[in-house]
Image: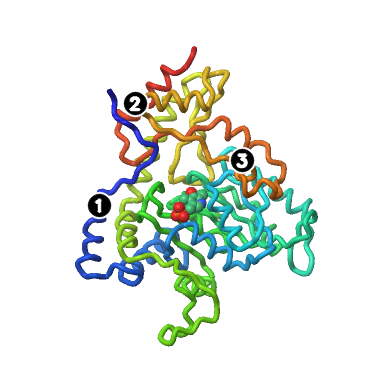
Amino acid sequence: MSEFIPLSVPSIKGNEWKYVKECIDTEWVSSAGKYVDQFEKDICRLSGAGYAIACVNGTAALQIALQLVGVTSDDEVIVPTITFIASVNAISYLNAKPVFMDCDDFYNIDVEKTIDFIRKETIYKNGFTFNKKTGKRIAAVIIVHVFGNPVNVVYLLDLCRARNLSIVEDAAESIGTYYTAGDLSSRHTGTIGDVGCYSFNGNKIITCGGGGMIVTNNRDYAERAKYLTTQAKDDPVRYIHHEIGYNFRLTNVQAALGVAQLESLQDYIIVKKKNYEYYKLNIDSIPGLYLANVPEYGHSNYWFYCLRINPDGYGKNREELMKYFSEHKIQTRPIWYLNHLQQPYKNAQSYRIEYAYKLYDRTLNIPCSVNITQAQLDTVIKVLKNGSKK
Ligand SMILES: *Cc1c(COP(=O)(O)O)cnc(C)c1O
C-alpha cells in the first residue's frame, strides 16, 4: 500500500536545531534574547518594512494591528468572506463588527466590489466613513493575501486614503510574496497598507511552531505595537501601566526556529513554484479540472495550490473527489467555509457575495508541502486521472 500524503507539513532541515540548542544551552529561552531581535531584523530585510514586532501568533498580530489603526468597539471593518476565520475574529476581539465582501478569481477580496460598496453604501462625514445602512463608522479594510496570492490592492489605495479608511494586511499566508507590476512593483505584501501581519503557524510556508509578526512603516505604530504586546509597561521597574496590554511577545526559542526557517524561505518558494508548475501542466489536461492561476501582477510564494473542479466535466463533485482522495491516502481540504455564513457572523452585513459560493463549491487544496516528493506528486496526478468518469 502507498504511504499517506499530507496536505501541508513543515520542512525543518537547516539551522533550526543549532539555533534552538543555543537558546537552551545559554538558558535564553523566554521573551528576551538575540533571536527575537534577529528575527525582527530579518523580517524587515526580507519585506522592506521599516519596523517589525514579533508576536505570539498571527491572530494576536491582527488584533494589535486593528487596535493600532484605531478600531474600537462599535466600529465596522470591511473583510473578505474567504479567509481563515482568525481575520474576522480579530475584529470581534475589539468588539467591532465585520462587513463581508466577495472574492475574485484568486480567492482574494473583490477590489471592484469593495470600491463599489464604499462609493455607494457609505458616506464621508467629519473626516470619517460611515455605513449608510447601520450608521456606524467604518474604520478599516482588512485585505487578506489568500494562499500567497497578492491582493490587487492598487485601485483601493487612493480611495481608502481619501476616506480615512486604514488598510490592515493579513499577510499571514504570503510571506515572501511581492508585486511585480505598476506602482507597487517589488513591494512585499504586508508593507503596502498601514500595518501588515505575518503568521508562522505550523501550516504556513515557514514556521516557528507558533508565531507572528507585525510590520509597519509608521514609527508610532511600531512603538505602540511593542508596548501593547509586552503588557503595556510604562515603568517596567515599578510596574506602572497606563493601559491594558497583552502578553503577546514571541519567545526566543520560537524566534530561533523562525530565523532558521527564514534562511530557507527563498529555496522553499522555488520548490513550491516548481511543484505548482508540474501539477498545473499535468492537471490542466484532465477534462473538468485545472489548477487555479496565480496573479500576473505579482510573484506569489505559492503557499497553497487550489484544484478547480467542474463536476460535470470531471464526473465527481468536490465532496466525492475529497472522499476519493482520502481512500487513496491523500489528504485534501475544501477552502474555509464562507465566514459570512458561520454561526457567529451570520447576522453581519455582507455585500453582493456571489462568486465566493462558486469557488467554495469547486475548490480543493491538494498536497503542497515543500518536501513532497516527485513520486508523491505523480501519485496525486495519477489518482486524479483515474478518478475521472470519462
Ligand atoms: C494562519 C492564518 C492566520 C492566523 O495565524 P496564527 O498564527 O495561526 O494565529 C490569520 N489569517 C490567515 C489568513 C491565516 O492563514
Which residue reaches farthest top?
Answer: 390
Q: Residue at x 49, y 76 (%)?
A: 232
Residues at marks 3 and 2, CA–CA distance in whole angstroms = 30 Å
Task: Mark 2 or mark 1: name the one nearer the start of the chain.
Answer: 1
The amino acid on which the numbered mark 2 sits, given as a three-letter code, is Asp
Tell whether label 1 touches label 2 (CB within 8 Å).
no
Q: Position of residue 85 (x, y in %)?
A: 55, 49
Q: Identify the residue position indicated by label 3 in the image.
A: 104
Q: CA separation, marks 1 and 3?
A: 37 Å
Q: How many marks?
A: 3
The N terminus sits in image quarter: top left
Q: Is the residue at mark 3 in contact range of ligand 1, meaning its CB lies under 8 Å from it?
A: no
Residue at left offset 57%, top offset 68%:
68
N-terminal-most mark, 3 or 2: 3
Circle on res. 378: 2
Residue extending furthest front?
343
